Image (tube, helix red, strand yellow):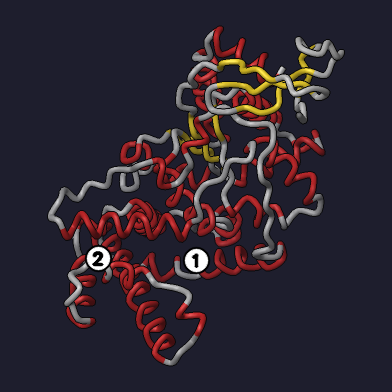
């Protein structure tokens, strides 16, 4: 057997320092000898469900830069990250990665070191891809609407994360790295999107719409995107486009939920009516996104972000940050994001914490973040500590 962590001599063959932990299962450690076939099982206590934390790239970036250059002046974040790593290693906290962490890290010169840092913190756990979560949420809500059920969305963490995140971590995890977007492309996209956003501010300041009107307008925009994507897919599929035949837009998935005899025109009408419903307005992804866009617009209307250069810096990561908050925050116990986004999430018109029972932290609330970590650390029992020593040393 391949021993991952040596614990002593073999009780069977007497070999010195060749017996130890081979692998960790959900309720035990398999122990074996590296010289003979002897094996045994060490029981592990049932883990309480780990707290799930989403760390925005802002935290990873600041922590990594402080690590390689302590003069950056943010010792507070280094202390937080060290505690997070400790609690993740203690099996009390899980900090899954998302696709944005990898794409953002491509913008750094010391990319390999940064990725290694991310792996230590995440311990191999990952959130589900955004497009899958979007499809899950929309189809789940569509079924609820068809069945005339309550419009409230019941968040199920298994939609975004494997239940394995709540088990004892093994010694090895699969590490797959894919080249989606280059660092330069990602940086250029962020700069361009921020410029386009800030360019709207002068127009917004002259408007007199209500928040509710803008929220509904944002939802209508999301519906148009779905309808346009379906039209383009249908047209391409009719022409025999193989790319279209291998992909299915969300509306087509929705139509498959309807009675088999429903024709295309009737099916699309049902979908349009759903997009106007309270159910659609409560899809977590769209509710958070549309509320935040409408909130930002009204902050501008009330006089915020007057200085263009400062607005560009403050909102450079707005779309990327919001995209990941909207997808993942409902499935987390806490998120740590940059100060500007944290301010928006706490506005009554967004009310992220109140709507999804997720704590929102930023560098401006580092003390509250530490207090939350204190609670997690205090929950680790003596039995848990003993199991940690047996499993990881």
Instruction: Look at 59% across and 54% down and name the residue there.
Output: 100
* Place of residue 267 in the rendered image (x, y in percent of width and height, measured from the top left): 21, 76
Q: Locate the N terminus by quadrant.
A: top right
Query: In whole angstroms, how far apart are the C-alphas of marks 2 and 1?
Result: 37 Å
Give neighbour class at mark 1: few <14, some 14-19, many 20+ (Cα, 10 Å).
some
Label number found at residue 257: 2
Relative height, residue 215 to residue 50 (above, below) = below
Write the residue at 62% across / 45% down: 58
Residue placed most toward the observer, 284 or 166 = 166
Task: Name the residue that disc number 1 marks.
Answer: 197
Residue 201 vertical placement versus 144 (above, below): below
Q: Quadrant of residue 124?
A: top right
> In this orientation, does residue 144 appear?
yes
The mark tally for this picture is: 2
Name the mark on residue 42: none
199 up-or-down from 70: above or below: below
Q: Is residue 298 visible?
A: no
Helix, strand or loop at disc 1? helix
Locate residue 264, reporting x and y percent. 23, 81
Residue drawn at point x = 48 percent, y = 75 percent: 246
Q: Residue furthest bottom?
A: 239
Quarter residue 70 falls in:
top right
């Amino acid at each position: 057997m391949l021993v991952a962590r040596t614990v002593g001599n073999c009780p069977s063959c007497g070999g010195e320092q060749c017996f130890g932990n081979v692998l960790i299962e959900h309720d035990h450690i398999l122990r074996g000898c590296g010289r003979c076939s002897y094996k045994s099982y060490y029981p592990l206590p049932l883990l309480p469900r780990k707290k799930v934390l989403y760390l925005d790239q802002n935290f990873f970036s600041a922590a990594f830069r402080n690590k390689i250059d302590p003069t950056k002046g943010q010792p507070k974040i280094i202390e937080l990250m060290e505690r997070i790593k400790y609690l993740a290693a203690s099996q009390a906290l899980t900090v899954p990665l998302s696709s944005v962490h990898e794409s953002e890290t491509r913008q750094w010169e010391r990319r390999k070191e940064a990725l290694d840092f991310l792996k230590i913190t995440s311990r191999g756990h990952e959130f589900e891809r955004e497009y899958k979560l979007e499809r899950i949420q929309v189809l789940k809500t569509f079924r609820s609407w068809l069945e005339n059920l309550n419009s409230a969305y019941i968040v199920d963490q298994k939609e975004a994360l494997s239940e394995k995140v709540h088990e004892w971590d093994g010694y090895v995890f699969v590490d797959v790295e894919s080249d989606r977007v280059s660092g330069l492309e990602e940086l250029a996209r962020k700069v361009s999107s921020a410029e386009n956003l800030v360019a709207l501010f002068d127009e917004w300041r002259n408007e007199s719409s209500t928040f509710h009107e803008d929220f509904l307008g944002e939802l209508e925009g999301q519906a148009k995107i779905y309808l346009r994507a379906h039209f383009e897919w249908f047209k391409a599929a009719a022409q025999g486009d193989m790319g279209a035949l291998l992909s299915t837009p969300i509306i087509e998935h929705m139509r498959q939920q309807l009675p088999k005899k429903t024709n295309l025109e009737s099916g699309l009408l049902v979908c349009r009516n759903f997009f106007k419903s309270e159910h659609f307005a409560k899809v977590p992804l769209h509710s958070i996104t549309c509320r935040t866009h409408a909130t930002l617009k009204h902050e501008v209307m009330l006089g915020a972000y007057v200085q263009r250069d400062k607005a560009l810096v403050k909102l450079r990561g707005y779309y990327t940050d919001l995209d990941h908050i909207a997808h993942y925050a409902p499935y987390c116990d806490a998120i740590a994001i940059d100060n500007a986004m944290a301010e928006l999430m706490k506005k009554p018109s967004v009310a992220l914490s109140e709507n999804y029972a997720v704590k929102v932290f930023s560098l401006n609330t580092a003390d509250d973040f530490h207090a939350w970590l204190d609670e997690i650390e205090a929950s680790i029992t003596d039995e848990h500590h003993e199991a940690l020593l047996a499993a990881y040393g």
